[in-house]
Structures are given as structure tokens and as C-alpha cells.
Image: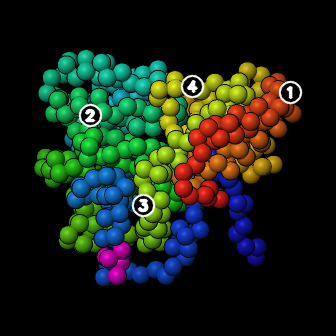
Amino acid sequence: MMTLEPPQRILMGPGPSNVDYRVYRALTTPIVGHMDPEFMKIMDGVEARLRSVFRTANAVTIPVSGTGSAGMEAALVNFLEPGDLALICTGGVFADRMCDIVERAGARLIKVAAEWGRAVDPDEVQAALREAPGAVKLLAVVHGETSTGVLQPLEPLGRLAREAGALFVVDAVATLAGAPLDVDALAIDFCYSGSQKCLSCPPGLAPITLSARANEVVCSRRTKVQSWYLDLSMVEKYWGRERTYHHTAPISMIYAFDEALRLVLEEGLEARWERHARNMAALLAGLEALGLQSLPPASVRMPTLAAVLTPQGVDDAAIRSRLLSRYNIEIAGGLGKFRGKLWRIGLMGNSCTECNVLLVLAALETLLDEQGVIKAEGKGVAAAQRAYAAKPQAGRSAQTP
Ligand SMILES: *Cc1c(COP(=O)(O)O)cnc(C)c1O
């Protein structure tokens, strides 16, 4: 029988990102039982490291089994009971999913929508809160909306949530360990992420953290959480002090996740944020020099994902499939109303390197020149090189994927 041999891609989409060899090595270390005292020690380490990455002192700071969406679902189904009122700030696919979950949970929804490619306006959120004084239980927002490339400023929304007495829920799936985020300074009540984006671990875990206030809300529900698997009052009994069995922990994933967290902390959160900002600035300089236009305005662009409009007349599907087949580079197209109209180029975690920025620009230029609609002629790479020369890298040399 043939062995399994997937290609080694350069992953520059909205996740998964490339995985460090140390994380792969952790995946291959021997399984122990999920109640083994040695595994309990590993769990303690994971929780402590995760608190550092979230910048929080929250006791309940754990990786939930499942991908980022499990974090989203856990947030909403644990806080919301039938009839509760939730305010969702939306301007893209991922926040729209939150609205869907709110409705499935039998809660009532207030939707404050921004045009896709724009941040949600805090004044509109404030106006919506004033229409339902004291009634909104939870205000949720996506920090980095991967479908549009918008980085939502969190501070004003956090303040409004606090003033309204609502829990402040933040989706940091595409930003944790890639963009500045401080859970305690922002007084976020529930923050969730995914293992395969800026943390550069394979997909399969949703790190979450919840404030003491949020934990109280979960523990004082009138009704049972309709999801048995994601009921945090039970999941917490395994991860927290009791350490009683709920479901079998995905042991190998926890090993990998632990190693990925160690890598983040060895680099340093701030150095990591800086690396993402610097490489994104160079990528955007290159894309702009090719005449490609960013969807979000400069003030609200994610440092972990560029979203640029596909130029008129250029064959989107052909470019992306050739990037993959000829250059081994994965980027993504648009979602929802931007299907066929947007390129989403991720610089997340280990995929966020100067090498990859120059490579994707050179590959794109070659393919654009071949299609003949845009004359790239090396302008993108040159602009990125100038950006790097103007802001040389501090310290560490670039990591290879
Ligand atoms: C990827 C992503 C998700 C969903 O995560 P999965 O791991 O695919 O379940 C949710 N929110 C945002 C902002 C994302 O980028």
C-alpha cells in the first residue's frame, strides 16, 4: 500500500498556517492517559502559558476540544438562555455565524452591521444599547474579521459593554499571538481563538478564557446548556481543580499546543506582534505597487491577513490554482458576497516571514504578467524590499516555513 504523502505547502491563506518542526515532533511523542498525573502536569503548564498569551489572570483559561468555531459556539451557548438578548457587531462571515448561533440558542438578537470592509461604528452600538436599556446580556464582536481583513478596534466597544452591564465577548481566532491583544486590560469577559491561525499549531483546539464574572453567569443558569459537549461548567471540572473525567482530552493535540505556546512565549508576544506588523506592511506595499486595492481602509487593516480586491479582468481561480500547483503557495479567495472578487493572503504565525512575503509577491507577479491584464514587471517585490530596507528587522533571523 502507498504511504500517505501530502505535499509540503506554503500556507498563506486565512489558516491553517505552517507548523514548526518542534510542534510536529510534539505530536509524535507517546500518548499517556488523560487522567495520568503526568498529563495533569502538562495541563497545568498549558493553562499557565495560555494565560500569558491571552494576557490574563483568569482562572478558567483552557483549550476546548474542537476548532475555533467550538470556541464561538461555547461562548454563545453557555451565556445565552432562551429569551436572552444578545448584541452582535457584524461586518462579515464570521460575525454572521455568531448571529446564527444566537438564534439557534433561542436568544433574541440585535445586529449592528457595518458595510463589509469597514469596522463597526461604536456610535451605532451605543444607539442600539440605548434602545434596550439594561436588557443586553452579551455584546460580541470579531477582532479580526478574516472574510474582509478588518481589524475591529476593541476598546470603545468594551467600554460600551461595561456601561451596559453586558458581557464582552471577543473572537480572536485570527488575531491571538499575531495582533496586539490584552484580555485583562480590555476587560474582555470571554475571548476565544483557534490553534491553527497565528498560534501555528494544527487545527483542533479552541483556546478560551473567561472572566470570574462570566464564569458566575455560566454557573448560575436557570436552564441547562443545550450543548452537552461544550457545557463549560462540566468541561471546567476536568481542566480546573477537580480534574474529573468529562470527555477524553485530545492528548496529542494538547502536546502540540503546549509546544506551540512555548514557541510564542520564547519569541515574546510583543516581538511576535511586531513581526506580523512589519511583514504585513511590506506585503501591502508590494500589493499596492501592483495596483491592487485593499478592501479595508488603512486604519483598520489586520496585520495577519491582507484582503485585496481581485483586479478587473484577472482570472481569480486560475491565479490561485497556479499559485498552488506551480509554487506550492496557498492563498484564499473571497467568501460570501466577495466570492471571486477578493484575495485573502494570510501572514499568520510561522507563515509570517520576509521570505514568504517576497515569494508570494514574485509568484503573483509572474502569473499576472502571464495573464497580461496587469503589467507587474517586478514592481511588487521592489516595493516590499524598499519597505524592509526602511524598517530593518530587529534581532532574530527569519524562520523558514
Ligand atoms: C477561522 C475563523 C473562525 C473559525 O475557526 P475554525 O477553526 O475554522 O472553526 C472563526 N472566526 C474567525 C475570525 C476566523 O478567522
Prevalent SS, magenta region = helix
Mark linked to residue 85: none
Confirm whether residue 385 shows in the render: yes
Q: What x and y, as percent, mark residue 381?
A: 74, 38
Q: Residue at x 22, y 59 (%)?
A: 59
Quadrant of the rendered structure where residue 332 is?
top right
Residue matched to label 1:
372
In the image, residue 40 lies in the stretch drawn in magenta: yes
In terms of sequence position, does the residue under pointer 2 or pointer 4 come before the other? 2
Question: Cα distance, mark 4 to mark 1?
Answer: 23 Å
Q: Are marks 1 and 2 in contact (CB under 8 Å)?
A: no
SS category of the residue bearing label 2: helix
Judge left or right: residue 333 versus residue 299.
right
Question: Cα distance, mark 2 to mark 4?
Answer: 25 Å
* Residue numbers of the magenta segment: 38-42
Residue matched to label 3:
265
Q: Is residue 154 above or below residue 400?
A: above
In terms of sequence position, does the residue under pointer 4 or pointer 3 come before the other? 3
Looking at numbered disc 4 in the image, what kind of residue is underneath it? Leu
SS category of the residue bearing label 1: loop
The image's colour scheme reads rainbow
Q: Is residue 107 above or below residue 233?
A: above
Q: Residue at x 52, y 26 (%)?
A: 298
Category of crowding for the residue at label 2, using alpha-carbon neighbours closer than 10 angstroms: few (below 14), some (14–19), many (at least 20): many
Residue matched to label 4:
295
SS category of the residue bearing label 4: loop
Looking at numbered disc 2 in the image, what kind of residue is underneath it? Gly
